[in-house]
Image: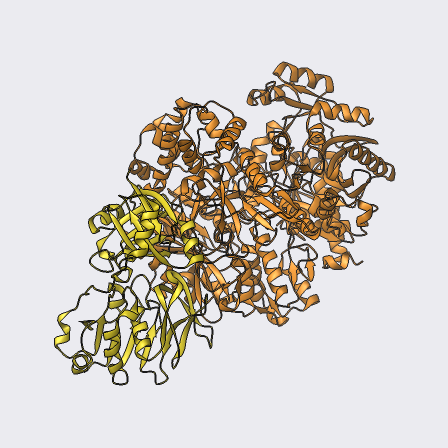
Chain colours: A orange, B yellow
Amino acid sequence: VIGQACEFDYSGSQACKALREEGYETILVNSNPATIMTDPGMADRTYIEPLEPEFIEKIIAKERPDALLPTLGGQTGLNMGFFLSKAGILQKYGVEVIGANAAAIERAEDREKFKETMASIGLAVPDSGIATTVEEGMALGEKFGFPLILRPAFTMGGAGGSCVYNVDELKKGLEYGLEVSPLHQILVEQSVLGWKEVEFEVIRDCKDNVIIVTSMENIDPMGVHTGDSIVVAPAQTCTTEELVDLENWCRKIIRAVGISGGGTNIQFGVNPEDGRVVIIEINPRVSRSSALASKATGFPIARIAAKLAIGLSLDEIVNQVTGKTYAYFEPTVDYAVFKVCRFAFEKFPDANQILTTSMKAVGEAMSIGRNYKESLQKGLRSLEYGRYGLGADGRDEKPEIAGDIEKIRNKLVYPQADRIFWLRHAIKYGLTDQEVYELSKIDPWFTHQIREIVEMENKVVKYKLNTIPDELLKEAKGLGFSDRQIAFLTKSDEVAVYEHRKKRGITPVYKLVDTCGGEFYPEKPYFYSTYDDATNECRATDNKKIMVLGGGPNRIGQGIEFDYCCCHASFAIKEEGYEAIMVNSNPETVSTDFDTSTRLYFEPLTREDVLHIVDAEKPEGVIIQFGGQTPLNLAKQLEDAGVPIIGTSVNSIDIAEDRKRFKAMLKKLKLTQPDNGTAISVEQARKIAKKVGYPVVVRPSYVLGGRAMVIVYDEADLDEYMAKAVFASPERPILVDKFLEDAIEVDVDCVSDGKQTVICGIMEHIEEAGIHSGDSACALPTFSLSKAILEEIRQSTFSMAKELKVKGLMNVQYAVKGSTLYVLEVNPRASRTVPFVAKATGIPWAKVATKVMLGHSLTEQGIEQELIPKHFSVKEAVFPFNRFPGVDPVLGPEMKSTGEVMGADEDLGVAYMKAEIAAGQKIPMEGKVFISVNDRDKRAVTDIAKRFDTLGYKIVATAGTADVLRKANIAIEEVAKLNEGRPDVLDLVKNGEIKMIINTPGGKKTKVDETKIRSGAIMHMVPIITTLNGARATINGLEAVKKKGFDVKALQDYHLK
Amino acid sequence: VTRAIIVLEDGTAFEGRSFGAEGEKTGEVIFNTQIIGYQEILTDPASKGQLVCMGYPHIGNYGINERLYESNHAHASALIVKEYSKIVSNWQAKGSLGDFMKKHGVIGVEGIDTRALTTHIRDHGEMKGIVSTKAFDVEALAAKAKGTKLEIRNSKFETNSKHEVRNSKIVINIGISKSVLACFPGAAVVAEDTSAEKILGLQPEEVIISSGPGDPRELTSLIAEVKKLVGKVKLLGIQNGACVLALALGCTVERLKVGHHGMNIPVVDPATGKGEITMQSHSYGVKGPGIEVVHKNLNDGTIEAFRTKKGDCAGTLYYPIDQRGKLPEGYKLV
């Protein structure tokens, strides 16, 4: 979820390893199957169960642990520890909390206690007050004056927080914030907007030894959540005196809060005009910032925190990176680190895109260079937004927009995801560093770095590739200019620039992340490239080795699942006696951990960066099928450059991705696909749609996660879509497919060694075809498919794997309509579902696939046939809608989820319920259920409503649906539609009377009202089901749960050998 | 752009650009891993004559403010950095680092691979070097560096008039910084050639031998005078002052292969593991016999703080202060 991504897989995995090293038996609870930490080998007992007190208590009762470590699982873990302790559950079972005790958590998280604690050491807190009702909050607002910042207590990533500038916004902000805070408590705070935001990672052990791991400075000042800010480490614009003062505050704070045997993140606001300091907040746990600090310095905070929690002290823990010093020291760096954020606003066009104190970023990339200019440009090209540095890459705004001073001012004042590019436009327009500061409050030091980049751009643009002096080219590379940028500036192309550079000997050297700024010779450093230096510290060996390309920053459609696969590839490579070389830029991941691979290159995943590493390492093979779309996009270019890609061939990947070639292959194999065509104009699209018949699915070619993919029901819809999709052209065609209504969608993962193919798992979707597979819940094994269809699925999969000569993993999406099997899509690479299938079947498929690529047949590995588990595993998607108030949470062919959870049980219904609860749905066991469905669904919903009625739920409906249901003898409480009298349905939602909503979208006419109801439900955390199949699964689940209740079972017990 | 070069006595050379004073200077080449603190390092008398290489690549960002000087002028001979900031950005800044260095005669070399210089010294030990903005013949410069005998200890440091009256604390100044001095409010400050008789005549409770530059073993007459003070008054030595005290107590003092220069250095009580992260700038280490180890350096195991069995003499090789000149909370000097 936003605010809590795979950084906690990183911290959890580190903790498991650290505790095991010390001889402890570990029990891990996490509902996310896509994680490395939930691998059966990581902990002794692994529970993929909902992170809810009811389930945790059951696990505690079963396992009887000695201690609970809640500080490594983000805000979720911390809250759970706190609530379990408060509820007396831990005392009941004699479980000790380690890492941070309940009193310390409360002093840090409870706003009132935090203020008191800070006051006791004399540290200023912005004027603020706690409100538990809207009225209290309004009174506080009046007292402090606007603007104000609202911070709900005990939420993650600033969820529910906002900056408000007037009474209206305050009221709305209070209502929402009080709702989302688990304690219904909100801090109304005088704003320090525009102050410098400086954070620290601080650690204290049981001997009262305290260290500051690093400082970090947000380029975007106070007002933008640190998770949405561009961050540099260490802080750049504070004097020694200011920083030492802040560090001394940190030491006082960690002692006053009472953390001993753990770490905390501390955020300060510093007034840039006079140096005044206020404390903003602290997080008494391993956080997103601590993952960043770990990767930025090489100091593994999570690992250390786990060891401190069990009573070791800093001076006893060896610093594994240097191999000769201890964890008791403060890391230092001799390079520049940037963290840049990846957003997903393109998925939520209706969302407010201004960045505030509520985090909206879905992923991040970290970059390292020997100066900030190099590092910044590397960071921006790591984001894979299609930008190759800070502008000058042929992707800039048109001059009339980039040069519009009103637009520039607006973009500087109101921070959005692209503000950094507007700094460049502002400089080009002629604004001074000071003027930029006044508009944006960005420190002139940072603006000046960008100015130096612009100055270099102005020098380079005067040359052609064959005239540019070597010195200047080298200098430009030293400021982080990519080959794409240089190609754009010199009117050349990327490959020519690369070849030219190599000929002229202008290539990067590799330097180390060693925790100590070169003071000691490190045993296990990791690497980054730079052009700004002469000496090379590359440690490439002559041993045989395989390189793995990672997935880069998380985004919707490409998340932790692919990092899971990359890590497994690395583990398998090492097991086979090769060196594993990892390339990735995502600081949140396990793959960028210093001890996951033999050598780690913390680098952008672009052509030039990867090729240079290949040159330095000369691997026997490069694996590109595990990192999602990122390395796949590079496949052709790398192969053309002579890189030895192993596994399924680039040609096969192209067959699967190229519509024409794919169609031809299916024809050859006598497989069916929905009628379709490719359009390069509106007229053509209309023609195809008419031919295949409405409804049709339309989308641009070569996209990830169903980007810009919609179902259109008539020609008017199609025209509207095509009008928006201006990019339809021969280079960028639009794909039109017949949409299969009411079909069952099926996902298949398989592994093949070129000769033999084995099914890893067949998953049946809960939602009907048309909902993106990443957003749909699915079950393994299947539950409604006939033996004949399953057999057809298997044979089709085998024949395609054979035809594509797959070596490794392949994913196929099918739709079953009636008795016909349609092939929707084939991806001859690791898919999003691989980790889920691995957890459901107990077989590490990514590892198996890697070994296949290294030449071990499936038979050799003992993988002979499909394993169909006796229990059900259900995967459910997790959505970020609560971050985007007002956005319609309805599901469609475009993927919107940011994560996933899993529920397992012998009973499908119970497994589904577990998944729903784990996904954060507050499924009610009684109360009122609001049902409103479109006309198509009215008949089918009757049966569902009846079953809810039988279970004792009260049914609420508006006129249309109510009439239908009454005819079936169901007692209905009728409620007014919006604008048809009060109280209306939204009132009932807001008042907490309605506990669950079943609402299928009715079409354009009713969309406005429905969006209000649906987004209202999200705001008030009322579970909302937008498909009939979802509703059916829910009632199945509720019936099963009411009959049997929940039980918990460790992964290890499901897969007893 | 003016060229500037740093050449080590072993012939290793790095050429970059000048950003401070121009000229040529020979000195000990020291690397410092601090990210911040360039102004304090330059003005600390203990840096006298040093050619200081900063490991962190961006130096000069927040400018210069004389309120934060560790003494009235710069003592280091040169500052070697990766990238000198072209802009000063801090509300307190009163000027740029480059201008300050020009005014105080500190040569600046920027644009070199400071990590390469740092790791070279790490691997080969601290050595002499030469910086120049005038001559660029590497061989000649290396020979010059090798042949020059450094004269660090022939300077006098400030005293105050408080030693005319009876004082509970007396500081023998061999190059103290403002921050260290601030630990001893009201103390009298006397020159390093003050005799033991004179000091005892002032009836102090405690005598502090301050921090300072150079090789402490060269302070033979001071060592002889301190010997006379042992047993008669509480003695505290800081940094090189601790070396002087150790020599007076009959211990050995040796040059470390690589000195300790940074603000992230852990020292711990060997018995308990409780420690402090300290700021250090010393190239000499103390060895027994006859002293108790209070703190050892956790990185290399060398003695960082000691005391005599009786407890009347103590020394810390680190600065017992943070960069603000404050003692860590709850920390006792002796």
In the rendered view, would you say A242 is above or below B214?
A: above
Can residue A875 be seen in this snapshot? Answer: yes
Out of A732 and A161, give the one closest to the viewer: A732
Please identify the quarter of the rendering in which residue B83 is found: top left
Where does the image place residue A51, in percent across and percent down from the top left? 63, 56
B155 vs A434, left or right, is left
How many labels, in total? 0
Q: Nearer the viewer, residue A726 or A697?
A: A726
Image position of A724 with respect to A1014: above or below: above
Query: Extreme right residue here?
Result: A788
Which quarter of the picture shows residue A834? Answer: top right
Q: Is residue A803 above or below residue A563?
A: above
Give the quadrant of residue B36: bottom left
Q: Position of residue A988 (x, y in %)?
A: 57, 45
Residue A22 x, y percent position in the rendering: 61, 67
Which sits in the foreground, A228 or A884?
A228
In this rendered view, identify the residue nearer to me: A51 or B309: B309
Q: Is residue B59 visible?
A: no
In percent of width and height, residue A196 lies at 36, 48
Q: Quadrant of the C terminus of chain A?
A: bottom right
Please tell me which residue is depicted at 41% across the width and 42% down the height of the picture: A372
* Relative vertical location of residue A760 with respect to residue A76 in this rendering, above or below: above
